[in-house]
């Protein structure tokens, strides 16, 4: 909050923090409303589903079982190089399309309606989150979180530009490393071991921790 005795720099920082907090609160309210609507729709779908039938997700996995699944198993000499870090066996190996982003992304931790100092997450192509501080890039200290809980991965993917021509851009994704208590995107638990695309202002939560992480980039600050 701004005070008359603040320096110009402190005043500017306070104004920026207030705007971030307001945007985060609005996002949180939208997420809550969307989650309630999704839960109602899921309940109705489950009630209507025949017990012996297969749902759409199961059919989709049968048709394309490898869709958006990462490659956890490198081969050859790479296996010994990438499977351990500081003597700790790693659960994740980067995908071939991994790429460092050009956009300056930030991950803002929020606890008890307070915005903490952000993590700068644009300097590498991936960031490991979890409790094991020997190997993780972003620590998750809550006991319900896994030692290697999830990975924020940047991937170079092909899209169609305004002229209808294929081009590649680098997008952020989150992948849960088969954690016990899950990873939540905007209040909804995501499937494990699948890349889920992230968008600006998305909110992440891990395990039973109440700490939330808001994804923003420099253009939104």
Image: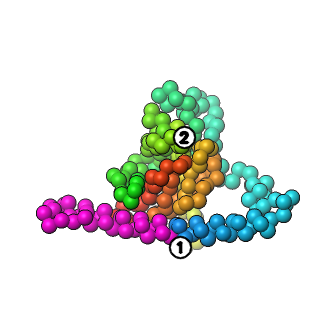
Indicate the position of residue 1 as horizontal and vertical percent values.
Answer: 25, 64
From the image, give the main secondary structure of the stretch colored magenta.
Answer: helix
Indicate the position of residue 64 as horizontal and vertical percent values.
Answer: 75, 55
Q: Nearer the viewer, residue 48 or 130?
A: 48
Vertical comparison of 94 with 56: above or below: above
As drawn, which residue projects farthest toward the bottom?
163
Residue 76 visible somewhere in the drawing:
yes
- Label 1 – label 2 distance at C-alpha: 42 Å
Asked if residue 24 lies in the magenta stretch, the reply is: yes
Q: Name the residue tied to disc 2.
A: 146
Indicate the position of residue 41 as horizontal and vertical percent values.
Answer: 68, 69
Q: Residue at x 63, y 49 (%)?
A: 192
In the rendered image, the quadrant that contains the C terminus is bottom left
**Label 2 crowd bin: few (<14), some (14–19), many (20+), radius 10 Å:** many
Q: Nearer the viewer, residue 110 or 63?
A: 110
Tell me which corner region of the image, top left, top right, bottom left or bottom right, holds residue 55.
bottom right
Q: Name the residue tied to disc 1.
A: 162
């Amino acid at each position: 909050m701004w005070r008359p005795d603040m320096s110009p720099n402190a005043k500017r920082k306070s104004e920026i923090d207030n705007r971030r907090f307001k945007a985060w609160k609005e996002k949180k309210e939208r997420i809550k409303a969307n989650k309630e609507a999704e839960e109602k729709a899921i309940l109705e779908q489950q009630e209507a589903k025949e017990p012996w039938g297969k749902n759409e997700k199961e059919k989709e996995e049968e048709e394309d079982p490898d869709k958006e699944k990462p490659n956890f198993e490198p081969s050859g000499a790479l296996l010994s190089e990438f499977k351990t870090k500081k003597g700790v066996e790693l659960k994740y190996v980067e995908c071939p399309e991994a790429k460092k982003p050009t956009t300056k992304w930030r991950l803002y931790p929020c606890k008890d309606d307070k915005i903490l100092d952000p993590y700068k997450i644009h300097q590498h192509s991936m960031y490991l989150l979890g409790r094991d501080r020997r190997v993780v890039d972003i620590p998750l200290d809550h006991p319900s979180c896994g030692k290697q809980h999830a990975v924020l991965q940047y991937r170079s993917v092909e899209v169609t530009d305004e002229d209808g021509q294929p081009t590649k851009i680098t997008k952020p994704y989150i992948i849960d490393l088969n954690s016990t208590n899950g990873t939540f995107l905007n209040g909804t638990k995501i499937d494990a071991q699948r890349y889920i695309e992230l968008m600006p202002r998305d909110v992440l939560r891990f395990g039973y921790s109440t700490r939330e992480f808001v994804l923003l980039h420099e253009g939104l600050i």
